[in-house]
Amino acid sequence: DQKPRQIAAGILFEWDAGLGFAENLLRKHISRSRLSSADRRMVQEIVYGVIRNMALLDAWIDSTAGSPQGTLEVAPFSG
């Protein structure tokens, strides 16, 4: 079984790749999981929180990483 943070990361990778709307991806992944209601809420909060704060997170990562926006390499999620 996957942990809530792993599920949230998978959803965000799929969303970023344009594979669906966040709400639909959340519904799909959460329905397949055996998470408690608290963990389901955590997944939802992580996903929506990242999307809501995307510009701030991008700026922070870019300034920390020292690379121009959009050039930071991220290992693909395998879940």
Image (cartoon, rainbow, N blue to C red):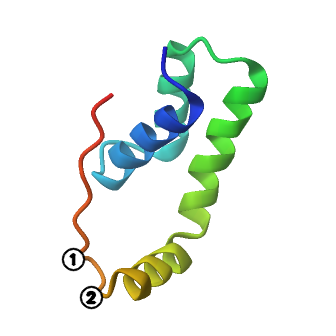
Q: Residues within 10 Å of mark 2 (few under 14, many from 20)?
A: few
* Element under disc 1: loop
Please name the residue that numbered disc 2 is placed on.
68
Residue 24 in sight here: no
Image point (27%, 51%), residue name? 17
Q: Is residue 17 left or right of residue 11?
A: left
- Residue 57 position, x and y percent, is 51, 73
Asked which secondary structure carries label 2, the reply is: loop
Q: State whether residue 63 is above or below residue 22.
A: below
**Residue at image coords 76%, 22%:** 37
Residue 30, picture quadrant: top right
- The quarter of the picture where residue 44 lies is top right
Tell me residue 45's x, y (percent). 68, 47
When the figure is inspected, residue 29 is found, relative to residue 69, above or below; the finding is above
Q: Position of residue 48 (x, y in %)?
A: 61, 53
Would you call the spot at circle 1 few (<14 residues within 10 Å), some (14-19), or many (20 or more)? few
Residue 63 tag number = none
Residue 15 visible from this viewpoint: yes
Query: Given the current orientation, which residue lies at the most extreme right position?
Result: 38
Q: How many marks?
A: 2
Q: Specify the amino acid type for callout 1.
A: Thr
Look at the picture and state if 21 lies above or below 33.
Answer: below
- Would residue 37 be found to the left or right of residue 12 on screen? right
Query: Which residue: 50% across, 78% down?
Result: 55
Looking at the picture, how far across and down is residue 9, in whole percent?
45, 43
Residue under label 1? 71
Q: Looking at the picture, tell me which residue is in the foreground, 57 or 28.
A: 57
The three-letter code of the residue at mark 2 reads Pro
**Alpha-carbon distance for marks 1 and 2?**
6 Å
Residue at image coords 64%, 17% = 35
| Mark 1–mark 2 CB contact (< 8 Å) | yes
